[in-house]
Amino acid sequence: MKEKSIELTIPSQPKISVNSSRLFRREIFSVIRNYHQETLSQPTNLLTIPTKSRAEDQHDVVFKQQLSFNGIAKRDIASLGKTQGQLIILGSGWAGFKLLKDLSTKHYEVTVISPRNYFVFTPLLASSSVGTLEFRCITEPIRRYSPKIKYYQAYADTIDLKKQVIHCTSNIEHKKHEFSIDYDKLIIAVGAKSNTFGIKGVDEHAFFLKDISDARKIRSRVIECFEHASQPDVTKKEATDLLHFVVVGGGPTGIEFSGELYDFITEDMARLYPGLINLVTMTVYDVAPQILGSFDASLRDFATKKFKRKGINICTNRHVMEVKEREIIIEEEGSIPYGMLVWSTGLTENPLIHSMSDQLIKDKSAKRLLTDEYLRVLSKETGQALDNVYALGDCASIENYDLPATAQVANQKAKYLSKALSKIAPEKESITGTEPFKFRNFGSMAYIGKYTAVVDMTPVSEKAKEGGILAWLFWRSSYFTMTVSLRNKMLIPMYW
């Protein structure tokens, strides 16, 4: 028996005038309601939709224009009335994400280009790497905040500043096609990559902590080490080597990860692998004389003593010569076996910043773009600031006003620039008519494990420094407040 097809007939519509918005929408809703009623009343789900007539096609054009001018869908007229033209933001880190959230789209047609379509709340990345928080708790989709902002998932390879063109390569699966895009104003906020100092084997064998993908790899490797060590044919010596976890870098990121890893091993893995817990060792290597070099001396001593009491080895004044698959070569100690090595020793320029060495001036380290006090990049040819190109975040440094490459600095620069650009847009003024950027240092925080943290707010007040449980409560409450969305504010306490 042949199955009957349903002829879905769309009622003919009256001719719509520009001013009949309410009547038009009522008719459209009527069509949708009739469509669902007719569909649900039939015994089969096979639909045969007739081809539109020429009159209906013309009606669709009117319908599209009507929706556009009533604010329902404006994608076809995105640049209508944009007095400042196309503004491109490169990057979706702290600086780029803050900009796309705060920047007014009234005067700019904003486009974001970044290889990842989400923002990572990096202060809690170490927590997610060991399962204290799930990955979704610290990520925010870029497309969520405004349908008026365009986004392309791609790498910015090179920039032609004279022609005002960006050459990009898409970052979608295996389809690496190239494209170019023009700009009227450009904001470079591409961040930086981990600095390996050219040491052999680091890229191949070490783990980094810059993105969600890195956190996933670290969590998987920790579990893999314990599983491997629990195999019946593994000797005690081999198990001890597998359960030696090494962190290279004694800054806030390396120390926070060490504290989180210690909690994970002593609280979770100890229950799952009780026979292996006594074989676990952790070591932090740093080339500096002390860990947490940017913190107050009393807090550095406090953190060092806490780590030693927990059995975490602190080895300062150490120089890494080479990293092998299961060994690290230390100049002062020789070959040291390990199961997992996390590398956290600072930042260096990414490929885009490196490609701009012949066009723009860089700082003394030649790793960051140099800008003036208004965050405008400086031309290498003229030595003058470019009015339509800005740089901020980890990839940029202000001339004669060097600041650390931290999330706090990037966030404040982005907040300043979004306000300044929105202010000068209506009259097409120069940004020099606004106040120059000034950084306000609110201090630093670091978690060191077992409900203990160090908080250094001496830039605000000389006595504003604390180590212990109170500092841990302040650390958690501060980062909870700083999380971007209401969704994450609800998710994070559930895991904490």
Image (cartoon, rainbow, N blue to C red):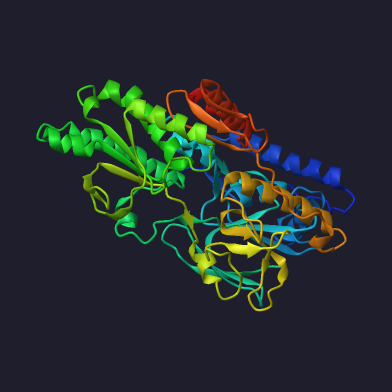
Image coordinates of residue 127 in percent, x first then y, are 45, 34
Q: Is residue 280 visible?
A: yes
Q: Quadrant of the N terminus?
A: top left
Q: Is residue 81 visible?
A: no
Image coordinates of residue 88 in percent, x first then y, are 66, 61
The outermost residue toward the right is 19
Say which residue appears at 90% left-offset and 51% top-offset.
19
**Which picture quadrant has residue 161?**
bottom right
Image coordinates of residue 47 in percent, x first then y, are 55, 45
The number of callouts visible is 0
Q: Nearer the viewer, residue 72 or 138?
A: 138
Image coordinates of residue 493 in percent, x first then y, are 54, 24
Say which residue appears at 51% left-offset and 36% top-offset.
297
Say which residue appears at 68% left-offset and 46% top-offset.
412
Q: Nearer the viewer, residue 216 or 177?
A: 216
Query: Vertical placement of 90 versus 48: above or below?
Result: below
Q: Is residue 3 left or right of residue 312?
A: right
Query: Vertical placement of 88 versus 105: above or below?
Result: below
Q: Is residue 102 left or right of residue 314?
A: right
Query: Vertical placement of 22 versus 175: above or below?
Result: above
Q: Is residue 26 left or right of residue 373?
A: right
Q: Is residue 490 left or right of residue 261?
A: right
**Which picture quadrant has residue 204?**
bottom left
**Which picture quadrant has residue 249?**
top left
Query: Vertical placement of 56 versus 312: above or below?
Result: below
